[in-house]
């Protein structure tokens, strides 16, 4: 399969990349979401701006209150990062579950969330982390709360001429006590259902919980009813079973030839339970 | 519009003009005539096109040739040195690691990448590392044994 023709531009810096955008140019990171779409001709931009050689986008920085993950950091780099493993174990667990090692060596976290595939892993994980997305354009930088970032089916808060430069993960008690579990579509390895859960405990009682679900609806989402049902209670099989009852409340559950609405709803219950039981 | 690229493949520098949309696997096969790298699924699922780019295993059907400009690649043709089989190739021969042989180049490139990261993998780790490589003959059992042979030889155990 051969993509339609396009112009290729390699950017040496974020500023240079922003200057190259415009018209129907699109950003090329690791290419593992974009190139398959180009090959299927689902997408045919006039130009690609390659940001994969911009080294400033490729580091994971350990700050006092947060960890900054560059948009160009690969899934493989996240999978083996010791700082993230300590402060936010669900990040490494999710990274290991993406595709295979060859895919993880190319695909990037920034590219994944910009693409916003409804079955991708990072949207669920980042919703659970309470991350901030740092975005740059010719007008300067802005920060978008992850709860405001995913807008729908392959749709995000990113506007024309903007580039994600990094994702900021807060160092919190709930991120230190977090997990990611996933039921894979066996051929594509995308999530039929994936659940990230992060829980802060205080004296045996849930002080706060954040849960992200992917693969279930047209966009990753937080099942708020589950989070609030757990808060103030001990974390055990009974409280978890009771809390997950309304896990798909307020969303339209997807149905396709991989999984019917009924089966996906069932999987959502099972995987939220499994994630939470991992944290008991 | 033609793009000028310079890529080192198996130690030899190649300079060429390619269309931006040229896939790396097509550049390797069509421009360099290195047909050991196979195209199986063409959707980054099967792993037949696995090569090493700057020391890491990647699927060359899902990379543009222009993205590899300035990179160092190793293809299956680059495994043997001075006419001697690489231990991985020897392992596949000794342990009957191939049946039809279509997946074999990708299997060997994924496996040599694994042994670089983990010189003494367990059977489970070998099987995990091959999750991105399919063998339609389902000959995984002997593929695993071939990789164990190579690991043993490279660690000096059976040398």
Image (cartoon, coloured by chain):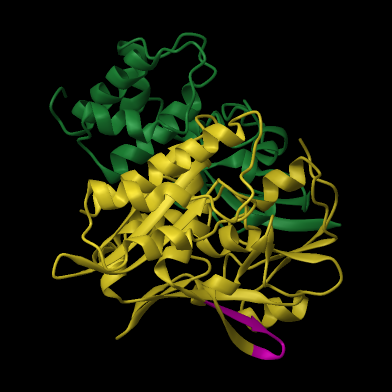
Horizontal and vertical percent position of residue A221: 54, 59
Considering every residue shown, the one lying at the far bottom of the view is A139
The chain that appears green in the image is B
Q: How many marks?
A: 0
Q: What residue is shown at x 63% (from left), y 53% (from top)? A: A31
Q: What secondary structure predominates along the stretch shown in magenta?
A: strand
Q: Relative to residue B68, is residue A100 drawn left or right?
A: left
Q: Is residue B51 magenta?
A: no
Which quarter of the figure is the N terminus of chain B placed in? Answer: bottom right
Which residues are drawn in magenta?
Answer: A133-140
Of A107 and A192, nearer the camera is A192
At 37% across and 32% down in the image, what residue appears?
B111
- Whether residue B84 is situated above or below residue A11 in the rendered picture: above
Q: Which chain is yellow?
A: A
Viewer-proximal residue among A182 and B10: A182
- Image position, residue A94 (x, y; %): 40, 52
Quadrant of the snapshot with the C terminus of chain B: top left
Residue B119 in the image: above or below residue A35: above
Q: Residue at 77%, 40% (x, y): give it.
A: A40
Residue B11 horizontal/vertical position (percent): 49, 46
Residue B137, relative to residue A90: is it above or below?
above
Give the quadrant of residue B158: top left
Query: Is the residue B39 above or below the residue A199 in the image?
Result: above
Viewer can see residue A42: yes
The answer to whether residue A140 is left or right of residue A208 is: right
Res A87 seen here: no
Q: Is residue A222 left or right of residue A230?
A: right
Residues A165 and B135: in front is: A165
Tell me residue A259's x, y (percent).
58, 31
The residue lying toward the viewer, choosing from B126 and A98, is: A98
Identify the residue at image location x=64%, y=56%: B67
């Amino acid at each position: 399969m051969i993509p339609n023709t396009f112009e290729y531009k390699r950017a040496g810096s974020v500023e240079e990349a922003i200057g190259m955008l415009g018209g129907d140019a699109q950003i090329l990171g690791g290419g593992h979401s974009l190139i398959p779409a180009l090959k299927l001709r689902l997408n045919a931009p006039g130009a690609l701006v390659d940001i994969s050689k911009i080294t400033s986008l490729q580091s994971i920085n350990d700050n006092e209150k947060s960890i900054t993950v560059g948009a160009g950091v690969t899934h493989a780099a996240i999978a083996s990062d010791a700082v993230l493993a300590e402060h936010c174990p669900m990040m490494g667990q999710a990274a290991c579950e993406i595709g295979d090692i060859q895919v993880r060596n190319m695909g990037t976290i920034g590219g994944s969330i910009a693409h916003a595939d409804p079955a991708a892993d990072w949207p669920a994980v980042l919703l659970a982390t309470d991350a901030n997305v740092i975005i740059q354009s010719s007008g300067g930088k802005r920060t978008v709360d992850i709860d405001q970032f995913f807008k729908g089916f392959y749709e995000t808060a990113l506007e024309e001429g903007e580039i994600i430069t990094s994702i900021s993960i807060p160092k919190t008690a709930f991120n230190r006590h977090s997990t990611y579990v996933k039921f894979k579509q066996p051929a594509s390895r995308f999530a039929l259902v994936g659940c990230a859960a992060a829980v802060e405990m205080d004296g045996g009682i849930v002080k706060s919980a954040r849960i992200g679900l992917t693969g279930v609806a047209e966009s990753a989402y937080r099942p708020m009813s589950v989070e609030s049902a757990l808060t103030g209670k001990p974390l055990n099989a009974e409280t978890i079973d009771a809390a997950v009852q309304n896990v798909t409340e307020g969303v339209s559950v997807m149905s396709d030839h991989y999984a019917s609405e009924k089966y996906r709803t069932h999987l959502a219950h099972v995987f939220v339970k499994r994630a939470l039981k991992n944290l008991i | 519009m033609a793009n000028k690229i310079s890529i080192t493949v198996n130690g030899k520098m190649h300079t060429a003009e390619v269309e931006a949309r040229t896939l790396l696997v097509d550049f390797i096969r069509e421009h360099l005539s290195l047909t050991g790298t196979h195209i199986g699924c063409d959707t980054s699922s099967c792993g037949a096109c696995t090569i090493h780019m700057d020391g890491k295993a990647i699927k060359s059907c899902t990379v543009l040739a222009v993205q590899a400009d300035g990179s160092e690649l190793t293809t299956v043709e680059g495994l043997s040195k001075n006419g001697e089989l690489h231990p991985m190739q020897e392992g596949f021969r000794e342990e009957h690691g191939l049946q039809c042989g279509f997946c074999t180049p990708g299997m060997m490139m994924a496996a040599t990448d694994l042994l670089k990261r983990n010189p003494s993998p367990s059977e489970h780790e070998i099987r995990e590392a091959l999750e991105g490589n399919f063998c339609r003959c389902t000959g995984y059992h002997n593929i695993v044994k071939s990789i164990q042979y190579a690991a043993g030889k490279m660690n000096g155990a059976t040398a």
